[in-house]
Image (cartoon, rainbow, N blue to C red):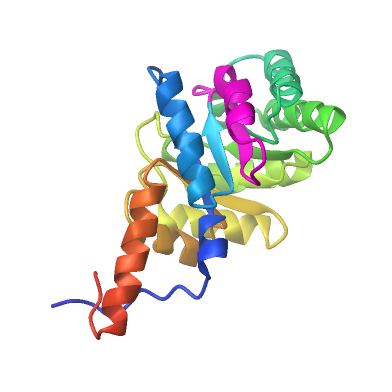
Amino acid sequence: MCAAKLENPMNDHDFGKLFDHTILKQDATKEQVVAVCQEAAKHNFMSVCVNPGWITTCVKELEGTDVKVCTVIGFPLGATTSESKAYETKNSIENGALEVDMVLNVGFMKDGNIDAVESDIRAVVNAARQANDKVIVKVILETCLLNKDQIKTACELCVKAGADFVKTSTGFSTGGAKAEDIKLMRDTVGKDVGVKASGGIRDYAAAIAMVNAGANRLGCSAGIKIIEQRAANDTQASAGTGLY
């Protein structure tokens, strides 16, 4: 038996702007990266999220659109030095990135070295602000490696250091986004800081669960599938059935 329609009051434009259309795999080719840019422009996504080496390619491909280029810093382990992360941030912005997703130093966080964690985040935030004060800085917590208290503390440090978003996962560790973690992150950072769910969001039901838990950005490679499932869900619901 089909369930009722999933509630989603957003229009197509606003729903599309939830997505950072992502291609971060090590063996991504130029053809694949260009295709992701074209898909993002077609579906009105917020950004494409790529490794730093692909920034200039994406800037060229997305010229004339409102899709931003997002990149990752200290990816995927977060264990590089703060100085390295700051330089990578500056260089990425100079190359055209308008959003940067840095990876938290998880080892520092698990050791309880909160001063080092805050300093690491602040180094990236300061580098971004100096390069372009309109750039959005997101901090990837890698929630699957942290307990609830550590997630809460990490979120508090992100806010204190001036980050714009907290984000769940790289997608390269032992787990991805969970609605319960999104809720904890949202409850901790409040309404003025963004929450990005990423890792393992592969269908419309999962996407809406994250939004309902408090996410206002979704990082995934399945954005087109999710858009198509949303349209099918709306169509079937208008006929009295739902997809899920």
| Along the line of sight, the residue nearer the viewer: 50 or 34 | 34
Q: In this view, does 29 lie to the left or right of 239?
A: right
Residue 170 visible within the image: no
User: Where residue 239 sits: x, y (%)?
Assistant: 25, 84
Q: In this view, does 83 lie above or below 14?
A: above
Check if residue 107 falls in the magenta segment. Answer: no
Q: In this view, does 28 lie to the left or right of 12?
A: left
Q: Is residue 210 above or below residue 95?
A: below
Which quadrant holds the N terminus? Answer: bottom left
Q: Residue visible at 49% across and 24% down?
A: 76
Q: In this view, does 54 lie above or below 183?
A: above
| Along the line of sight, the residue nearer the viewer: 90 or 39 | 39
Question: Residue at the left extreme?
Answer: 1
Q: In this view, does 126 lie to the left or right of 190?
A: right
- Which stretch did the figure color magenta? 51-78
| Along the line of sight, the residue nearer the viewer: 118 or 64 | 64
User: Where residue 32 sits: x, y (%)?
Assistant: 40, 27
Q: Is residue 211 left or right of residue 160?
A: left
Q: Residue visible at 78% across and 30% down?
A: 128
Quadrant for residue 216, please give it: bottom right
User: Where residue 199 sits: x, y (%)?
Assistant: 41, 41
Q: How many marks?
A: 0
Which quadrant holds the C terminus? Answer: bottom left
Check if residue 74 falls in the magenta segment. Answer: yes
